[in-house]
Image (spheres, rainbow, N blue to C red):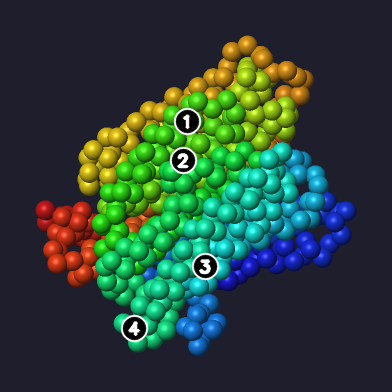
Amino acid sequence: MLTVLIFLPVLGAVIVALIDRSRDPLLRWIGLGASLSSFVASLLTFALFVPGESRMQFVERAAWVPSLGISYQLGIDGISLPLVMLTTVMMPLALLSSWSSVTERVKEFTISLLLLEAGLLGTFLSVDLVLFYVFWEAVLIPMYFVIGLWGGPRRTYAAIKFILYTMAGSALMLVAIIALYLQGGAQLGIRTFDLLRLREVAVPMPLEAWLFGAFALAFAIKVPVWPLHTWLPDAHVEAPTAGSVILAAVLLKMGTYGFLRFLLPLFPQATVQFAPVLSVLAIVGIIYGGIVSWAQRDVKRLVAMSSVSHLGFVTLGAFALTVEGLQGSLLQMVNHGISTGGLFLLVGILYDRTHSRLLDDYGGVAALMPRFAAVALIIVLSSMALPGTNGFIGELLILVGTFRRVPAYAAAAIGGVVLSAIYLLWMYQRVMQGPVRVKAPAAMVEVTRRELVTLVPLIILIFTIGLYPNFLLSRSEASVRALLRHVSVRTAVQSPMPPQKFAARIPPGPRHPTHQSRR
């Protein structure tokens, strides 16, 4: 099932490649159909997924390079399931958003997005480290072309900067993978890149700290964690709308997913040791991203810088090392993808009409496009974590989990919540309210049916997750608790001082009903 999920977009890309490039409508429909078929497959996976189990489900394993212990191994658990669903939801919407904005090289553009989807799904589903690395690097190629061929005036600079930053971190991660492989061979007596086997390897310090640093750098660049964020605004501003949507909604989550999937289970002692450093960097990113967003006059750059702030919350929750923190971090990955992806769709709709992203060129849009203004208000309130929307429960869990560990961190992160309300409401007021200042009011036609189709699913998800988040939390809780137990046990074994304080942060699972009745 997981192989089908990954390679359905590849099949669609192959079909698109065989069709004459002059048939643009057919190329678009085939690309959309391939991405929708992958979405249907993910819905089936979601429906058959068994909540309450921490093990990998739907596992597929086949020898790839047996002499080196490399295997084609896929699996899905409560940590990867939400990100797989996010990927398959956002890709059809991204393809729809490019329906009228991308008019050149439609064939190549559609192929690039479908291959990008396959790479992202492979990254979230790989259990073998070499297979993970192959998909991790494969994502860079189509994204490079999406920015470099269909981007803005400085697209070449942005594309090169994007790939240089990400490949620099990836090279160090590859060295760390090889070192972990050799260390595992010495301890386990077998050659393997299997994550489930390698997480039982006790890497001695300070080697574990160096390997942790190599993995953490690759993931931190991808998030991006401050101060490794400078590639992000350029990539977002120059990318086409579809590229910005996928970059913000899914691509950045590869880094935060890496924190949970690889750093915590493979390097538990180093994780506990360096968690305060990464938490402080996350808090700096939260505050810095909020302040810089407030100072922007380009609405697309404002949304791009807001990602630095919002993903700082995700990083903070990941290294809180509490159930609430990790649950909130995972949920907020999905929430950020929905809300920020929606903001980029809104910016793209405005740009298609005015060909301007400057705040000074807008004003009074609500009087000209009332339906658009109503949808935009919902997405803005979601991004600023208004209660009842998806962003609220994610940030609440992160702050609660962080407060249980270091109350001062949670208190400092509250500043980011205030700043997000300031710059998002300020942006909405400048664009939507006041007298009409748009240079060409006749061009500000109401949102089309196709544009509504791209926005309505996000509105539904905003309120569904905001009012009933348990359909995601119930599927991730068992995996999160198992991960924290693993970190606690491994840290106690490797450290001369058992971390009772850390273990105390992992509350027991829900009581059996008979226990509650007796109580």
Mark 2 surroundings: few (<14), some (14-19) or many (≥20) residues within 10 A: many
Mark 1 / mark 2, whichever is N-terminal? 1
* Residue 79 pos. (x, y %): 41, 59
Q: Nearer the viewer, residue 310 or 58?
A: 310
Mark 3 / mark 1, whichever is N-terminal? 3
- The amino acid pointed to by label 1 is Val
Q: Are marks 3 and 1 in contact (CB under 8 Å)?
A: no
Mark 4 / mark 1, whichever is N-terminal? 4
- The amino acid pointed to by label 3 is Tyr
* Residue 335 pos. (x, y %): 46, 44
Give me the residue at 81% from left, 54% from top: 26
**Mark 3 vs mark 2, CA separation in Å:** 24 Å
Mark 3 surroundings: few (<14), some (14-19) or many (≥20) residues within 10 A: some
**Mark 1 vs mark 2, CA separation in Å:** 10 Å
Give me the residue at 39% from left, 73% from top: 180
- Relative height, residue 509 to residue 342 (above, below): below
**Mark 2 vs mark 4, CA separation in Å:** 40 Å
Q: Closer to the camera: disc 2 or disc 4?
A: 4
**Mark 3 vs mark 4, CA separation in Å:** 22 Å
**Mark 3 vs mark 1, CA separation in Å:** 33 Å
Q: Nearer the viewer, residue 465 or 343?
A: 343
Give SS at disc 2. Answer: helix
Q: Are marks 1 and 2 in contact (CB under 8 Å)?
A: yes
Disc 2 target residue: 308
Number of labels in the image equals 4
Give SS at disc 4. Answer: helix
Disc 3 target residue: 133
- The amino acid pointed to by label 4 is Ala
Q: Are marks 4 and 1 in contact (CB under 8 Å)?
A: no
Q: Is residue 253 visible?
A: no
Disc 4 target residue: 186
